Structures are given as C-alpha cells and as structure tokens.
Image (cartoon, rainbow, N blue to C red):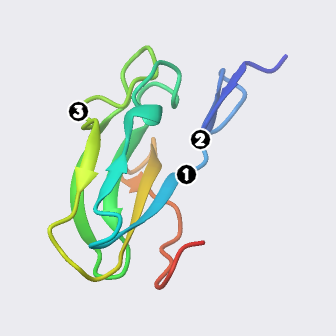
Amino acid sequence: MHGVSRIGCCCSADCECEPVILGAFTTNSVTPVWDLSPYRGPQTACPEARWRLREVGAGLLYGSGIVDDDGYLTGLPPSFRTGYIYDGYMRLEIGCVDETTGNVIWPQTLIGKIS
C-alpha cells in the first residue's frame, strides 16, 4: 500500500525521496521580488527532506533549511528580493538525505534560463 504522496517523496516506508525543483523564478530590475508564500504551507514536502533557495547561473545560495514534521519548509522567507539588475535564475529545491552517507542529494543543476 502506498503512502501519502507529497512533493519530492512518498511518505511511507516503501517509497523513496526524489529531489525536485519546487519552484523557479527569474529576478531582475523589472521583477525583483519572488513571492515564496505559496511554498510556506503544510505538506509542501516530506518531513526530514531539505530545501534550498539558490541562483542557478552563479551557484549562489540564498537560504536553506529542513522540512519539519508537518511538511513546512522551516525558515523559508515570505519572499526573495534581488539587489541586482541582471537576470537571476532562482530555484527553490527539495533535496533528499542519503541514509548511508548523510549527504543531501539535490536536483540536477541547470545553467541558463529556466522556463
């Protein structure tokens, strides 16, 4: 029997976590703010997964945290505001902890514009 399915994983003993891109947004001088409030609710991802907010082109990390027992991305801000005028290709990613190594496995990195 399968468990409850959430973004990035299936919450039961017979399912495995899969890294996913939860959201993507291009920031610049015209659209400097990414509203992250849609990702701040319960059951956004499975407990014990990890999240990170990063700019893909330069590989800059703007935030990270864990997913709590209720599926909240703990510490995720309500929005992200860029201070730059060039295009920043932002991603909100869900990563999975490898139980053997303890390392976090993230979605594949894409360089360039995200559609």
In depth, the one of 7 and 16 nearer the eye is 7
Residue at the far front in the pictured view = 30
Q: Which residue is mark 2?
A: 8
Q: Secondary structure at mark 3?
A: loop
Mark 1 crowd level (few <14, some 14–19, many ≥20, 10 Å Cα): many
Q: CA distance from mark 1 to mark 3?
A: 19 Å
Q: Quadrant of residue 58?
A: bottom left
Task: Establish if 91 lies above or below 7.
Answer: below
Q: Earlier in the sequence, mark 1 or mark 3?
A: 1
Q: Which residue is mark 3?
A: 75
Viewer-nearest of labels 3 and 2?
3
Q: Earlier in the sequence, mark 1 or mark 2?
A: 2
Q: Amino acid at mark 2?
A: Gly
Q: CA distance from mark 3 to mark 2?
A: 18 Å
Q: Amino acid at mark 1?
A: Pro
| Residue 102 seen in render | no
Q: State the image coordinates of residue 9 (x, y, percent, origin top left).
A: 62, 36
The residue shown at (45%, 49%) is 95
In depth, the one of 91 and 45 nearer the eye is 91
Q: Which residue is mark 1?
A: 19
